[in-house]
Amino acid sequence: MEDSQLIEAYFSNELDGEELTSFENRLKADLRFAQEVENYQLIIEEIKHEAEEKAMKVKLSEWDQELDDEPSKRMPLVRFAPWKVAAVFVPFLVIAGLTYYVINGQTTRDHIELYSSYFKPYEDVLSTRSGGTRSGETRSGETRSGSAENMAKAMNSYNEGNYQQAISLFEIISVEEKDKETATAALLYAGIAYMAVDSLVQAVDRLQHVKAQEYPLFKEVADWYLLLVYLKTNQIDDFNHQLSVILSQTEHLYFEEATRLNNQWDRDK
Amino acid sequence: MKNRQQDSFEEVVREICAENEGYVKQLYKQHRSRFMSWFMKQYRLNQQEVLEVYHQAFLVFYFQVKNQKLTTLASTIETYLFGIGKKLMLKDQSKERSLVDLSEVDVSLVDNQTVEKEELLHKRARVREILKKVPEPCKSILTLYYFSEFSLESIAVRLGYKNSGTVKKKKSLCLKQIRAQLVKKPE
């Protein structure tokens, strides 16, 4: 085996037993070889660092967008004696408050109804026709079948509507699964399952994590479901921000749905 | 006895190393406004230019903490970020602000640098420069394999290769090419 192949196998944890011992002994004894190993190590470390940096830059830009979308709230100072202000405005405030209560009550019901009309758990795109899943694509032969089995169990629970069970299984997979794509898929389905059981704080957390990963399909699905969460919780600013994220991309998976939702939302306001 | 600032920085180290994104986001947002105001006034830069500097400064800080190169801080985080920003402005007269240079930003934190450490820093910087120019599909193959930890089979499916054997050969070739550039003597 060429040195380069040997070194690559070492960094891919493919050497064991005698091969590994022999490699490590050579590393100590052969300076030129050690230098080569160091070169490869540096290259691999910097590949990881560059990718991580790129991912962080995307996040920083997203956070900038969030900051830039936050409305500044500056109220002018009113230099009146408080009791004079109260005398003039209290009756108005009472009426306005009651009206707001009635309208807001109505709005609250409307946005929940709108949410209910749009929310459907995302379809199972992972299960193969043979009944297995397309997960378990990790490099470790040992975990491959275990990983696929866990994912199949989780998707089964999800498909049957046993969302609490599905959540438990997806959460484990999202943490333990070495294959990042599978882990991200598990996080996405966990997020949607949390929505199904009305645990919206957890749903937002999981969906935002999915959005931060580099998988376009999952990102776009997360975009849509986050939009629905913000609709249900009446977080108008977040809802509008999320809506603009989807509507700014005509090729977005949920562009049409978001357009319909937006039209309906505008009509009902 | 540890003071509050040290306690607080221990929390920062802990949360960044634990990859607590919400915490890092809060940290980023907390320091952005003052950094940008100061640098825009001081260096007469526009918002976009200062934002780039802030991004670079924050990333240097973040990776120094994450890679455990920065474990204690005598100053506040704000002061530290400002310090990085000022060094960036001093080092770089042109619009390009390369993170290659930033590996030297933490020079004040490193005591008794040996010649070997200097050489390693320099080599690391060279690798970064080489990686910036790595073309596709090498860039995708290497990123998917080493960063995303995809299996060779998954990469073959993702990138449309015949099988994992093809990807393995391609990956080896890509690494060899990078390594060859690294050991090439400068002209």
Image (tube, grey):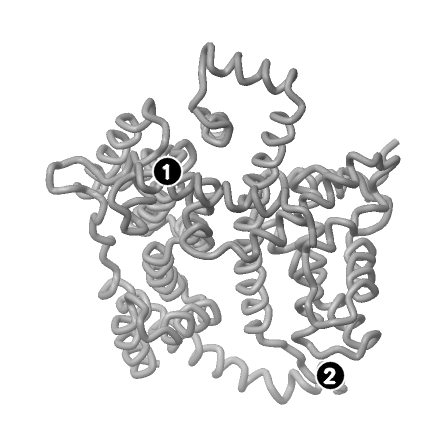
Residue under pointer 2:
A77
Q: How far across and down, in percent of the image, does residue A27 sit?
A: 61, 20
Residue B62, numbered circle: none
Label 2 element class: loop
Tell me: residue A268, above or below residue B126.
Answer: below
Q: Is residue A185 left or right of residue B126?
A: left
Tell me: residue B124, above or below residue A259.
Answer: above
Q: Amino acid at mark 1?
A: Lys
The front one of B52 and A122 is B52
Q: Chain of mark 1?
A: B
Neighbor class of circle 1 (other Cα within 10 Å; few <14, some 14-19, many 20+) is some
Q: Is residue A164 left or right of residue B17?
A: left
Residue under pointer 1:
B168
Q: Is residue B21 left or right of residue A235?
A: right
Give the CA distance from mark 2 to mark 1.
69 Å
Residue sticking out furthest to the left: A130
Q: How far across and down, in percent of the image, does residue B61 sit?
A: 71, 50
Using the rendered view, name the quadrant where residue A133 is placed: top left
Q: Quadrant of the C terminus of chain B?
A: bottom right
Label 1 element class: helix
Residue shown at 31% from the left, 41% from the top: B166
